[in-house]
Amino acid sequence: MKVFKNKSTLLKAAIFATGFSGVVAEYILSTLAQYFLGNSVFHWVMIISLMLFSMGLGSRITKNFETRLLKRFLILEFVLSFIVSFAALLVYTASAYTQSIGILIYSLAICIGLLIGMEIPLVIRINDDYEKLRFNISNILENDYYGSLLGGIFFAFIGLPVFGLIYTPFILGFVNFSVSIVVLIFLWDLLKSSERKALIVLGTFVMISLTTGVFVTDPIIKYGEQQKYSDKVIFAEQTKYQRIVITKWKNDYWLYLNGNEQLCTRDELMYHEPLVHPAMSLHPNPVNVLVLGGGDGCAVREILKYPKVEKITLVDLDPAMTKLGKTNPILTKLNQNSLNNAKVEVLNDDGYKYLLSNDDYYDVIIIDLPDPRGVELGRLYSHEFYKLCYRHLRPGGVIVTQAGSPYFATQAFSCILETMKSAGFQTVPMHNQVITLGEWGWSLGVKQPADSNVKKQLQNLEFNIPTRWINKEAMALITSFGKDIYPWEKDSVYINRIHEPVLYKYYLKGNWDLY
């Protein structure tokens, strides 16, 4: 009886490992989809749903298995260990050579789902020899669910933030592989001689592959990532929130987040000066300034040119990004060490949560966030968010946000402007040609009476601080748009709300094929 109990415990441990590895594999593929495809909520939902569906198909397939159940189970475990381990490596490598990376990600989701779905009914049938049916089913499923919980905790607190998407899959692979080897050893007597030889060969291949993969995956991913960028990659870091890459060509540097350009040292002033100076110069006494995003420190560099400023609070979600802004020699030279200035307080928090939890008031709020490619970023361009900003601004306060491209994402640009207006601001759109980004835009709002002519005030601004490009003449240009260049975009857009997110849809269906 004790022997039976030990064998049953081993099978439960195997299912626990499967649950652990399976759920983390889902999260890894969903995160990869977020990084490479954007629209994270959609892809998280679709990948997890597709994997669950595939598990159902896998369970159905096992109805056709009548014999050699243990051998089949161990083969599935070895194959699952291999595929899970190399999934991220395959995606990163393929991304350098194809635009159809979504097909690979979803194919891997289907494959892993099928394997997991086949394992659970097989273990239940194998364990039927050791436990009564009512205990067998409940115990197997219980261990699978417990493993899933531990996997989620591991991914959130250890896997992604510590090991990243490069090495976490190999940890999963080794967990699955190790349990499989233990099961193979202790249930050795249940296997035929030919089955033992086949499993030893397969297990040896998987062990060598996983061990080799740990050592070669980093240089392979770096090679694949280098192929993705036209310039030399000199820095790359996978954080809990995003992948940060810095590239170099001659004396210029580019900063990318999740593969999307954030700035280039050659022309970033064409972006940051329109972002900062119209808002700062429009306010008569900008003492307390809030910056949301902007972890590179360039916006803060421009704000520090105003002697009246007493305090700048910068709130950026990713501590790795603000650490770079504070310590990386490329960025500290570019931002003139602005994030280490005594007037600057750097906080790592979600901008929405920060405004909900504090009672401070500001003269100017500058929002320098990535484009709203998904629902999670769209909430920081929502009616509710701008209402929060409105409450935190003193009378006459000014807000400005980067708003994407008015030409490549016309409806998204208009949506941000109209959403800010719905929160009570008097709004003015602005745009400028940034060499490496193309035509880019901003939405500026003022907390003042509706009869005020903000556009005229902006066009009459005189800048009493040192600038490299922006002046009164430039203000007349960046606040003027001429006639609509895309007549089919004249239809009204909806206000972007948290409970009705439309902005990311406008953004994703923009005119990016012209970019």
Image (spheres, rainbow, N blue to C red):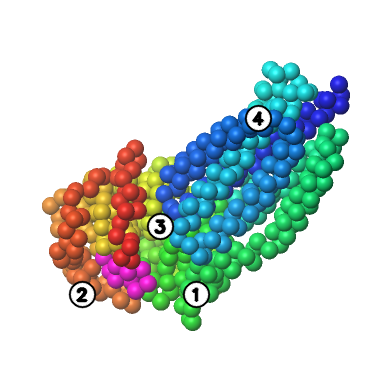
**Who comes first in sequence, dot 3 or dot 1?**
1
Locate residue 166, reporting x and y percent.
62, 56
Which quarter of the picture shows residue 89? bottom right
Q: Amino acid at mark 2?
A: Glu
Asked whether residue 384 appears in the rendered view, the answer is no
Q: Residues within 10 Å of mark 1 (few under 14, many from 20)?
A: some
**Residue at left offset 83%, top offset 25%:** 4
Q: Quadrant of the N terminus?
A: top right
The quarter holding residue 112 reads top right
Circle 2 sits on which residue? 473
Q: Nearer the viewer, residue 145 or 348?
A: 145
CA separation in Å, label 4 and label 2: 73 Å
**Residue 370: numbered disc:** 3
Specify the quadrant of the image occupied by residue 146.
top right
Q: Which residues are magenta?
A: 431-439
Could you tell whether 142 is left or right of 466 in the image? right
Closer to viewer: mark 3 or mark 4 = 4
**Element marked by disc 2:** helix
From the image, tell me which residue sits under label 4.
Answer: 121
Secondary structure beneath disc 3?
loop
> How far is mark 2 from mark 1, CA to CA?
35 Å
Please identify, in this view, whether the residue under mark 4 or under mark 1 is nearer the observer: 4
